[in-house]
Amino acid sequence: MNSIIRTIGTALLLTGLILSLPAQQREPPVSADPIWEQDLRGTVIGLPTLQAESAVVVLAEGDVKSYSRFGNWLWTYNAKERLSPHVSRAREGTSYVCTESGTVIAVNRIGRELWKLSLGTPITAPIVVGWDGRLFIPAGQKMYCRTASGYSLWMRDLGSPIFVKPVLDHRGGTAMVLDNNEFTLVSHLSIVEKIQLNAKPLHIVPLPLDSGKDSFMLFYANGGVERIYRGAGNELVSERLPSLSQTPAAAVGWKDHVAVTLRDGRAQLLTVPGGEVVWTENSHETAAERGSGNLEPYWAAMQFDERGIYVLSTKGVTGFRESDGRRLWILRITGAAAIPSFSDEGYLYSGGTDHFLHAYRIEERKRNIARSVYGPAPEGSYGLGNPPPSSWSRVGEGRYDPLVIKLMHDEINAAIKNGQIGEKETDYVGYLIEVAGLSLSPTYSQVRPQVQILERAEAIRQLGFLGSRETVPFLARLFAHKFSNGAYEDPEILKACCEAIGRIGVDPAGDAIRAFTYLLAPDNATMDPAALMAAATATRDLCRFSGPPLADAGIRLLRAFTATDFPAVVKRHAATQLENLYK
């Protein structure tokens, strides 16, 4: 009887001790057993890149591999040489990697190579993908800007190598720090702005626009915190904020807060823009939680979204509630070859030193964002789909004079050839849309100077070389305009629209594919073989670039082309495009 009483007493005592523990020490356990594992036959050398319920990993041996969240192998691409550890993914699923010799490679969402670009210098940080699919490529002391299809928009020599990796700011440009201590902004139009710093920071966190102006928080190795923002005269200025107690190993922002992981493994939430500490809690990396308590910068990562704040390292992951810092859970992992990544669906992907990719289910909550087979919609728009009136609109109808149009086409062609569109991009796009889209203008007047068909077609083709995904809806609307209001466009215009859309290559919303289906309508009066074949070629290009499910709709369209009462040459051409897709 006495032993029973002692046992009950011990149990009650333990229960009381457990209940008396702080809330952050009683988080629900997370299983350390992976839900699936896949043999990579190689070593992961960077963070897995996650998007649209799939993961892409880069291996030291030169392979790029992709798996679904259920563990199904999707594809493998072999670069035939060693790769840098950086991989970026665009919204439509294209992966961008770089070899150690400096060749950038675009691989579509089913593992096929789209294009290669030799820079001669390896990229020094992950490629940043802009709002319309454009690529900001950092290499040495230069920043290259390319369209999603690889066409050059501009290149800027920054004067010093990039020290802190570029991040996408809230205007759709990039922010970085150079080796000469210059904080540098490079806009999507290549405009460069700089401010001299006293030292090199470790991390840059873009803050929400302050009254429509840029704002950033910089974190230094000595714990210093600095805010960069625009002054009254729109110039970049800086101010010191309260310092952290230790070196920040990682930092991330979301809405009106910034979270940091300190070197000893503690996580902190800071206010924006003041930098005051809201709460401090232990992650799995603290000594109190059996961690090393000595986390080197760049050996941790953070994620911050509506679900909470997450600290990730090669030793595991800890989740915190944003409001009060209550620890949600800890997952400890061993044998990670690189920092793991946490997905919108609640899965953690970790590449191990055992050459396996391990997946853990650590959250039942999915992100509260629109579900899509493609990546999330961009934060904003560059306005290229509906640009402001071009500078040539000031001369009125004179801008439609054939001589003026020729001079403009020559200027834009020269900029395209030189790969230096730069600051004139918005103006060029505005002018080309004005010339190409006369029939779409609600103020179109039949008495205005008539722009010739070939001049309009040239403007449309040039839009393709400028390559913004934002112009695809305009081109699709121009193509479909004849079918919706009976104002039939010349086949040359239809052909030019198809060529431009195919050259741009990306169309996640499917605007172009929907426009091409009008060709199958019973009242379609367009039987021009060149226009029909151009539509088939553009459909193949879109399918090749974007993959499923856009490719599924495109393949059905190409099959319909082969079964419709089109000229025989068109049917053969559509069949060839189908065959090319299946190779």
Image (cartoon, grey):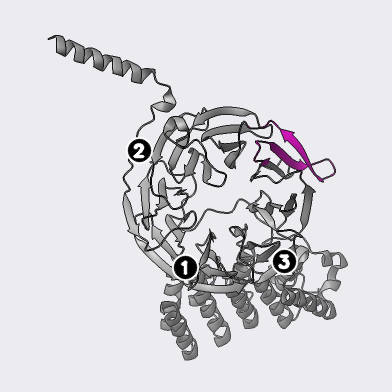
- In the image, taking residue 405 as reference, residue 473 lies left or right, namely left
- Label 2 amino acid? Val
- Residue 173 visible in this rendered orientation of the protein: no
**With respect to residue 441, does 269 lie above or below?**
above
Q: At 54% across and 82% down in the image, what residue appears?
A: 532
Residue 404, quarter of the rendered image: bottom right
**The residue stretch that appears in magenta:** 218-244
Q: Are marks 1 and 3 in contact (CB under 8 Å)?
A: no
Which disc, if any, is residue 62? 1
**With respect to residue 231, does 271 lie above or below?**
above
Q: Residue furthest bottom?
A: 568
Q: Are marks 2 and 1 in contact (CB under 8 Å)?
A: no
- In the image, taking residue 17 as reference, residue 185 lies left or right, namely right
Q: Quadrant of the N terminus?
A: top left
Residue 390, quarter of the rendered image: bottom right
Where does label 3 land, which residue? 155
Tag 2 secondary structure:
loop
State which tag comes first along the sequence, 2 or 3: 2
Distance from the alpha carbon under mark 1 to that under mark 3: 28 Å
Q: Are marks 2 and 3 in contact (CB under 8 Å)?
A: no
- Label 1 amino acid? Gly
Residue 390 magenta? no
- In the image, taking residue 279 as reference, residue 387 lies left or right, namely right
Q: Position of residue 14 (x, y in %)?
A: 30, 18
Which disc, if any, is residue 30? 2
Q: Residue furthest top?
A: 2
Q: Quadrant of the C terminus?
A: bottom left
- Label 3 amino acid? Met
